[in-house]
Amino acid sequence: MVDTSFGTAEQLKDPDYMPPLSKAVPLGIQHVLAMFVSNVTPAIIVAGAAGIGFGSDQGALGFPDMTYMIQMSILFAGIATLLQTIGMGPVGARLPIVQGTSFAFVPVMIPAVAGLGTAGLAGLMTGVFLGGIFHFCLGFFVGRIRYALPPLVTGLIVLMIGLALVKVGIQYAAGGVPLMGKPAFGSLAMWTPALVVVVVTLAVKFFMRGFMAVAAVLVGIIAGYLVAYLMGQVNFGGVGRAAVFSVPLPFKWGFEFNGAIVLGMCFMAIVSAIETVGDTSGITRGGAGREATDKEISGATFADGLGTSVAGIFGGLPNTSFSQNVGLVAMTGVMSRHVVTIGAIFLIVCGFIPKVGALINTVPINVLGGGVIVMFGMVCASGVSMLSAVNWNRRNMVIFATALSVSFGLQLEPSALQHVGKTMQILLTSGLLPAAFISIVLNLVLPENLGD
């Protein structure tokens, strides 16, 4: 039920309405807490894949670089959110849209930085920068390509995103990537905090109401963190060494063009743009009881692309609208974009303080694993939910079966492509790109009455 103490019913539906600060500030912080874990997790995963590692004495690049990537995720989530809420010319929907680092790109980014002899972080950040420019350009005609992405295609892509990530969740919960010399991997000491996260998250999600239910993963991670601390798994050494204030560095890891990474970023930008269209429509329907205008949809897509491109320059990852915050708008009934602006300012302030990133980096990998098990499972469930809207005739079943078998099979057995070029390996072993390509092409070329 909507709390009318925030304003009249008409005011609450108005994006330009500013509630009293005593109400607006807690609401803004609430939006930040609802997205915080999901926002920083992709940076931790990609940094780990790149060899940065967890903790001050692990990884090829070391603790400060992991902290830097977390810091950039926080900072540019805030900047991208401001682009949405305040706007700049045609950029921005001027709606309460919260931006954050996108999980959708993670299955493409992992092989881009590890295992296939790629350009590493320099190539990835260049790809993010150029992919963001492509994403921005989608704003001019995003409405025209929606027909090519029905629930059969988008549901399959979202399902594949989740399936590509569940292995990462289990590895992290068991103590990280299983390497020689890590006998603790898979031990009860590793699994205990992770299981605490899962159990507490489920308990809060199903037995609590309001904001607590929305922030269930955050509450679960805090509980698991406390258990890990009592078990001696938390190290605060890096927090003291982190700077109190610092500014981002342009192209910190260099500038290196890699065609496979750029293509992957551009293709996933299309998926992200469609997701943003859905989130924008969801906010206007849930908060104001109306459909989003073409101007709002294109503005939201422009902000997505610009926010991503700028983030790539300074070592951030692709940004997109956050669906959990769409639900928060519907739950509170407060449509004010100024509330989300307050949350964005909070993110930006934290993004200039490396100690915040360093503190987040004290979260043990197994605790994070417990959280992402739930999050990645929810991604799979979201894909299944989208697929429930599909008319499962023979045509659609064949399209789904073919795309799923090829894409998931290549992801499970990447050595099947050992004789193709590295560019094709990166594009095809992600699972996402072949699934999207096959399903889109077959959906466009096969007649609707095939096999009926």
Image (tube, rainbow, N blue to C red):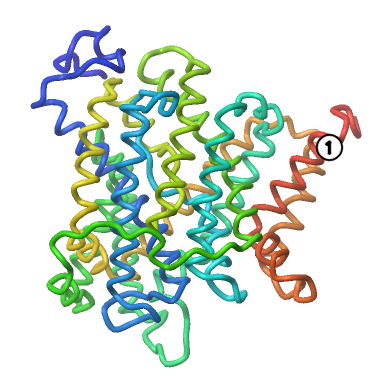
**Left or right of 392 on screen, residue 228:** left
Q: 263 or 339: which is nearer to us?
A: 263
Q: Is residue 285 above or below residue 249?
A: above
Q: Position of residue 358 (x, y in %)?
A: 22, 66
Residue located 52% across and 60% down the image: 165
Q: Image quarter for residue 450? A: top right
Residue located 13% across and 26% down the image: 23
**Residue lying farthest bottom?**
181
**Left or right of 450 on screen, residue 89:** left
Q: 170 or 20: which is nearer to us?
A: 20
Q: Quadrant of the C terminus?
A: top right
Q: Position of residue 227 (x, y in %)?
A: 20, 68
Is label 1 in a helix, a strand or a loop?
helix
Q: Position of residue 129 (x, y in %)?
A: 49, 51
Q: Is residue 84 above or below residue 32?
A: above
Residue located 57% across and 58% down the image: 108
Query: What is the crowding at mark 1: few (fewer than 14 residues within 10 Å), some, or many (at least 20)?
Result: some
**Residue lying farthest right?**
451
Q: Position of residue 274 (x, y in %)?
A: 57, 34
Query: In the rendered picture of this protein, how many numbered marks are placed on residues?
Result: 1
**Left or right of 9 on screen, residue 405:** right
Q: Image quarter for residue 111? A: bottom right
Residue corresponding to mark 1:
394
Residue located 24% across and 41% down the image: 212
Q: Is residue 177 above or below residue 363?
A: below
Q: Image quarter for residue 247? A: bottom left
Residue type indicated by callout 1 = Arg
Q: Quadrant of the N terminus?
A: top left
Q: 327 or 309: which is nearer to us?
A: 309
